[in-house]
């Protein structure tokens, strides 16, 4: 006897699928709502629960990048898989970076103070040495000593040094230059010799103009200084300015006498720059050693 099919009405099969879909949509919108209103305290609590559940999340501040704690991602952080020593120092000495910058600024200040102190000491020592050998000439007013931060100027008046309209030195002036040469031989720096005249034109068989006269007088002084073998010719420069750089207006015999002069200028800037460069090199070496020490502190060598 054949069984009759049960044609009684029931729940359609698609209803279960629809119910599952609605449940998923409700969960989705609940998640959207929770993400749209993040509470910092709740987020940290959730992070802690996830850490216990999955073992891949550390307890980190809300704004920090999460870092894994699994064996594979134990040291994970965005960047190179194997950082170079420089990158390693940058990552591992984040707290020390401001201190390094402060230390660099302090060392730079100390360097500048050391350069200024050494420069002033060098200038004072050089001035004292010149005063000792030129005491009589200074008292007589035949020469003047001036200086600024990096230069020493020995200004020689025409009186007692050159006859009028001539580039031939007097014997007293020659003897004085011998003493100056002894001091300059012991000092660093370039030596520039400048010749100056007044505005009265000159025209002789030897000198066609004041340019010739000023250059010839400067050359005579240079040749006298080079008689001392301790002074290298490479240190000497000769310049003739004629009447283009007067000390006073050429409106009286007294002022014109002030303009007729020879100036011996010792320039210490080159030696000072070399000294500063050497100090800066030593400073950078000290900073490099400090960074290396910090790297060793964060990455100690493994014990054998």
Image: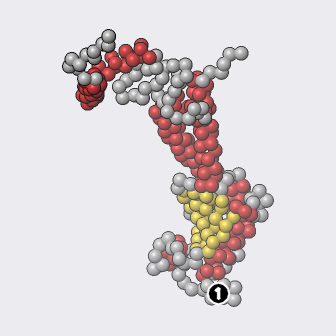
The residue that disc 1 covers is 208
Residue 81: which quarter of the image? top right
Q: Residue at x 60, y 51 (%)?
A: 273
Q: Residue at x 63, y 55 (%)?
A: 270
Q: Residue at x 42, y 13 (%)?
A: 52
Q: Residue 283's x, y, as percent? A: 59, 38
Q: Residue at x 32, y 13 (%)?
A: 2
Of 136 and 109, the residue lying toward us: 109
Of 99 and 295, the residue lying toward us: 295
**Residue 179 seen in the figure:** no
Side of 226 where 259 appears, left or right = left
- Quick one: label 1, few (<14), some, or many (20+) residues within 10 Å? few
SS type, badge 1: loop
Residue that sits furthest to the left in the current view:
9
Instruction: Describe the colour scheme in one phrase.
Output: secondary structure
Q: Residue 55's x, y, as percent? A: 46, 16
Q: Residue 37's x, y, as percent? A: 24, 28
Of 33 and 45, the residue lying toward us: 33
Note whether 5 is above or below 136 in the view shown: above
Q: Quadrant of the N terminus?
A: top left
**Residue 114 seen in the figure:** yes
């Amino acid at each position: 006897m054949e069984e009759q099919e049960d044609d009684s009405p029931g729940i359609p099969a698609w209803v279960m699928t629809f119910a599952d879909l609605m449940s998923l949509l409700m969960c989705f919108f609940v998640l959207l709502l929770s993400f749209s209103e993040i509470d910092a305290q709740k987020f940290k609590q959730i992070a802690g629960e996830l850490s216990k559940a999955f073992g891949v999340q550390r307890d980190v501040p809300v704004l920090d990048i999460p870092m894994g704690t699994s064996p594979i991602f134990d040291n994970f952080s965005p960047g190179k898989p194997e950082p170079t020593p420089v990158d390693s120092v940058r990552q591992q000495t984040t707290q020390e970076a401001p201190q390094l910058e402060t230390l660099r600024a302090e060392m730079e200040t100390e360097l500048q103070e050391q350069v200024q102190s050494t420069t002033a000491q060098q200038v004072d020592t050089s001035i004292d040495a010149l005063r000792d050998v030129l005491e009589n000439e200074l008292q007589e007013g035949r020469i003047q000593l001036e200086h600024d931060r990096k230069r020493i100027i020995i200004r020689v008046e025409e009186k007692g040094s050159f006859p009028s309209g001539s580039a031939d030195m007097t014997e007293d002036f020659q003897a004085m230059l011998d003493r100056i040469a002894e001091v300059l031989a012991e000092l660093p720096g370039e030596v520039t010799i400048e010749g100056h005249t007044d505005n009265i034109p000159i025209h002789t068989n030897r000198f066609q103009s004041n340019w010739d006269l000023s250059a010839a007088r400067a050359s005579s002084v240079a040749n006298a200084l080079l008689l001392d073998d301790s002074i290298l010719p490479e240190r000497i420069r000769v310049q003739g300015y004629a009447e283009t750089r007067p000390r006073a207006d050429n409106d009286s015999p007294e002022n014109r006498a002030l303009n007729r002069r020879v100036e011996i200028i010792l320039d210490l800037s080159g030696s000072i720059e070399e000294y500063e460069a050497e100090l800066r090199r030593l400073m950078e070496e000290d900073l490099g050693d400090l960074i290396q020490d910090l790297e060793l502190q964060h990455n100690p060598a493994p014990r054998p």
